[in-house]
Image: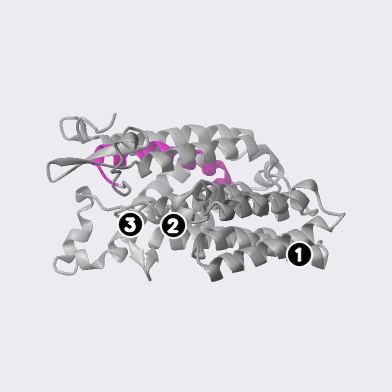
Amino acid sequence: MATPYSRYLIGPLAWYSVLMVGGILLAYWIGTREEKRLGLPQDSMLDMVLVAVPSGIVGARLYYVLMSLDQFVANPIRAFYIWEGGIAVYGSILGGALGLWIYCHIRKRSFTALLDIAAPGLALAQAVGRWGNYFNQEAYGPAVLDPAWQFFPFAVLIRNGGTPSWHVATFFYESAWDVGVFIVLWVFRKRVRRRGDLFLWYLALYGAGRFLVEQLRQDSLYLFGLRASQWLSLAMIVAVAAVFLARFWQQASIRQRVSALLGCVLAPARLLLPATAWGTGVVLALYAATVALSVTDARVGRLARWWPLGDAAVYGALLLLGLQGLWHSPYFVYAGLSIPVYLSIPYFRTAQAGPTAQSAAQEV
């Protein structure tokens, strides 16, 4: 398992293609189950696959080309040589969503309902598809020099110019994270408050994990000094937080509004601020304000009251141990896992629940 025996399953049939198609079929099967449960028109999932998959492929390639223009300036026609590799997951999500929106606009279907039935399967399909990176010997992390850690699944053996070397198996980390996202979405799918909420949670959960894992990759596309996928991950997290806070804002007190806002700012800020004196100072100030507002508010729930305090205690302990550097400590994983917790505080505290996913889907 440390290194694949071949990129190809049989003949010219690549493992990457097999896994991608397998992931799509798996997502389709899961989506058809949700289609029936929510009472959507028959073949809604089939129509979505026929629209979203081609537009997703175009978006995946276009995203990669735009982020790697220097590779195609001399010979622009190579932009169409998709068999040479070079696609991006975020491009497929954006392209697929755009194609689906156009389809729903023309056919008068519920865009958000279709996104909801696709969300769990999409996460699981990405978990399967990431194994294509294993067979292609790509999407790996920094070199692992300590022999004690040179084993799979912590690391993977990469053949660079014929000389094998151990690297962090980031593809496996993201695959495992995506399995976790699927499990959460599948368990949570019957409790969503509004149509489209399940897909919003997919964006937040996937974005949090992708931001962290992307920090370790060695072959990322960069934009303005940060990996392009990290910018998109942050944008998704911020967008989801904005939606949840906007709903919460209408029925919460000023104290609760500020506390929830600070928590949602604190969660991604810890991923961006450096582990320097001023960066640590800003994080501590955010913790202090959030804890002061939440603990002293008798009207908030247990999670909103005690989570910031416990989270601050964890950060303080890591700080005392000198382990607060995000990319070189246990805080790496912990910070990512805590982002959805902060987002859940305004989400579950919103009194105006709105229609359930079941009733909303029946409006189609």
What label does residue 257 carry, if any?
A: 1
Q: Is residue 57 visible?
A: yes
What label does residue 220 carry, if any?
A: 3
Q: Residues within 10 Å of mark 3 (few under 14, many from 20)?
A: some
Give the answer, above or below, for where 330 lies relative to 270: above
Q: Quadrant of residue 151?
A: top left
Q: Residues within 10 Å of mark 2 (few under 14, many from 20)?
A: some
How much space separates mark 3 and mark 2, taking CA atoms? Answer: 18 Å
Mark 2: secondary structure: helix
Residue 249: where, in percent of width, then height? Answer: 75, 64
Residue 265: where, in percent of width, then height? Answer: 62, 64
Residue under the point 15% across and 30% down = 11
- Kindly identify which residue carries mark 2: 94
- Give 247 or 55, whichever is nearer the viewer: 247
Find out whether the residues at labels 1 and 2 contact each other: C-beta distance under 8 Å: no
- Give 18 or 174, whichever is nearer the viewer: 174
Residue under the point 47% across and 42% down = 122
